[in-house]
Every structure is written in structure tokens, then in C-alpha cells.
Image: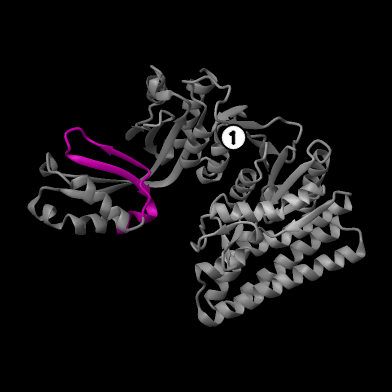
Amino acid sequence: MATLVMKFGGTSVGSSKAIAQACDIVGSYTSQWKRLVVVVSAMSGVTDLLIQSAGSASRGDEKTYKSLIDELRRRHHSVIDDLIANDEVRNQLIDQIKEHLDELEAFCRSIHVLGEVTPRGMDTITSLGERMNARVVTSALQERGVNSQAINATDLIITDATFQNAMPLMDITRDKIQTQLVPLLNEGIVPIVTGFIASTEGGIITTLGRGGSDYTAAILGDCLDAAEVWTWTDVDGVMTADPRIVPEARVIPDLSFSEVSELAYFGAKVLHPKTIRPIMEREMPLWVKNTFNPSYPGTRITTSPKTKAGKVTAISTIRDLSMVTVEGRGMMGVPGIAARTFAAVARQGASVLMISQASSEQSICFVIPTTNVPSVIKSVEDEMALELTRRDIDRVWALDNIVIVTAVGAGLRNTPGIAGRIFSALGMANINVIAIAQGSSEFSISIVVAADEADYAMQQIHQEVILNG
């Protein structure tokens, strides 16, 4: 019997109106899919409030963390009052919310005394948003006649102890999901599973990091051998560009998993690459749909989409970057300079987003987040102290206020003329290209431009290679 996994993000369950809409969607598909699993996020903004409450407590600001807890209470009570007509159910929900917020206040008092919050403690605190919202959504569904049951993912997804970015232990997780979810599905119950959170084998709460709720849905889809996974959000699908910057951006009907991975890496707010890995391995379709426009088809992501290879599919950007350059005429032909440079960068925990090296070997350039620049330059200078003294390396310096603009599409590397059209579009707009790189994966071409020209660059590339492609 085919299984469908649906995931609703924070904006899709962020208010009483949004939750009611999500419940209507779930109810409309219960007759079409006999086995339906729903993953829910915390209400939009709730995770931020939880993080802020812990941060305030660590700074000794009791007044602020208590006011944040009051705000969380007001938000959840307001939604419950709007959605739940049955007095008994409403009172039970309010009691459950109180238990969770009492737990939060107890944690904040402890953090207030200790003056710090550990990653393990933060995972427990941030898990509260999903734990509260899953119960609210479940009760709202039950009022609409949907036979549903709230399930904590801590009982299903078992991970290592890498708090705030835990990795699932898939064999144990698969056994848990099969044992606990399949019997409910066989009885016609719709499990409402908390996204984002999991636990260690010892029962300590963990979280799955960025894209956590999507990752939860992917894991469930994998372990249940689902036919499809649908992720509901507040846009009609994956767009060709950010519509706030490029008003002509349009929805992409079909995408490959590889294209989505490239878009996510280069800043687009789509699925995180780790999220889609379990789905890729199963080769099951993944849909991105709009909770507030459910009749729109959305974007279908598969291994082999219908899109034509060699065309630019979308454009994305990464901002707040700097380009660090290590340069010197004495670098020519000296082995190990690049390896030592990037070892020094790695010691600072900085993510290198793009690399460019002159064929003359007189310079190495790499792009990193601007916040990492001071520590990275010092680390490289320390590593190259002898070379700097001998003037083999002249200097290590940074160019700030740059943006990576990336064009993504299947088979770009083997398609003549694409790069030329991109640079022609930028040249006609008098936009200077600082650096370029083409991914060996064949799916992307990246350019570095000044931050104040990035939006115009996106608009020009979109017009030339997507709309006129």
C-alpha cells in the first residue's frame, strides 16, 4: 500500500489560519492515500524565541527570558482558542503547553545560574517548538474528523551525540519507525511527527541541524519506502531566482536532485543537500508545494527530470563574503603552498565557498564568509611566516563586500556558449567580474561580483539565459 509523507514548514503551521489550511490539505488527501504521515515544524518564529530565551538567560537577563516565555504562551494559547472548540480538548492542550513552558523556564533558571547554555541544552530547548505544535495540529485535525496521533520523533529517529547537527543511525531508526509507525498506518491513523528533533540511543534529545524538518520527512520516506515526499511551504515551488530581486522569476516545474543540491549550496533557500540524500538513494519523487495555493502543481524533483540538459535552470547567490588572496612571485613552483594555506583556513573552521588560482601560481584566491576573515588571515600569516619574511609571499589580504552569483543547470559544462552568454550579459551591463569558477559536477557556473552589483547581475543573467534561453 503506497505511503505519502507530507512536511509542513514553519510558515505553513505558523498561525491559526495557516494550521487550519494545513489541516484541510491533510484531510483532502486521506481518501487518496491510505497511508499518510505528516511532519510538522514549530510555528514560524517560535524556534527563534526559544533560542533568544536561552541566550537572555545565559546573559543573566531574567526579565527578558520571562517575557519571551510569556510571548510563547500567548501565541500558542491564541492559536488553540481559534482552532479548538471542544472545551475539554482545549484545556488539555493548554495544560500540555504549560508543561512544556514550565520545562523551558526551569532550563532558563539553570542557564541563568550557570551563565552558559551547552549545545546539548540548546537542543532540548529548541525541541519544544515542534513538541508543542505537533499536539496543536493533531487536535485541530481530530476536530475535523481526521484520525491522527501526535508522535515525538525522539522515539523514532536515533542519532549520534553531535548536538545541534546530529546524524541519524539509520539501521536503528529504520527498526524504530517500522515498529512504531507501521501499526498506526495499518489502522488508518495519520501520525503527526515532530520535525527537526531526534534522540541518542540513551534518550537524550538531539536536533538535525539546518533543514531539520525536511530531513525528518526524508528519513521517514526512506524508512517507510514511501511513494513520494511532499514539502509544503509558502511559495508555489522552487523559483528560477529570488522573486524579491528578480520580479520575473518563475516556478520551475521539474528539477533534478543534483540541481537542487547546487542551488542549496550556493545560497538558495531550498532543500538542504543532506535532506534529499535519503530520497535520492530511493529515487522517490519529492514535491515542493504551496500551502496557501494547494491547487498549484509545484516543483517536482527527481533523478531524471523533464528539463532540457544544457539550459540554465535557476540563479542563486551567497552574500556577506570576502575574497582572501595569498600572493607572491616566490610561490611559483613551490609545492605545498596551497595545501598549507587551506590547512590554516581549516584550523579556523571557515567554510571555503570558491577557489581560484592563477595559472602562473603567483596567487591563490578563495572566498569565505566575511566574519571569518580576521582569524583566517592571521592563521595563514602564521603558517607562512617564513615565506613572508623571505618575501616569497608578498601579502595575504582580503577584498570585502562581494557576492557569489551562481547559474545552475544540468549539463552546463558540456554546453557551448552558456558561459559566453552570461559574461556578455554582464559586460553589456558594465558589471565587473572579479573571479569565476565552474563546478566539475557540470551543474554550475559561479562568478564573483561586488555586492552593490549583485542584484543587477542576477537580473541581467536571468533575462539573458533563462527568459531568453
Location of residue 433 in the rendering, given as x and y in whole percent from the top left corner: 34, 32
Residue drawn at x 41%, y 28% is: 442
Q: Which residues are magenta?
A: 350-375
Residue placed farthest to the left in the image?
390
Location of residue 245 in the rendering, given as x and y in whole percent from the top left corner: 55, 35
Residue drawn at x 30%, y 53% is: 345
Asked whether residue 362 is drawn in magenta, I would say yes
Query: Would residue 299 appear left or right of 360 to someone viewing this image?
Result: right
Q: Nearer the viewer, residue 77 or 39?
A: 39
Marks counted in the figure total 1
Q: Amino acid at mark 1?
A: Pro
Query: Would residue 451 appear left or right of 336 to someone viewing this image?
Result: right
Residue drawn at x 71%, y 70% is: 100
Asked whether residue 155 is drawn in magenta, I would say no
Query: Would residue 250 appear left or right of 309 to someone viewing this image?
Result: right
Position of residue 103 relative to residue 395, above or below, is below
Q: Nearer the viewer, residue 343 or 323?
A: 343
* Quadrant in the picture for residue 296: top right
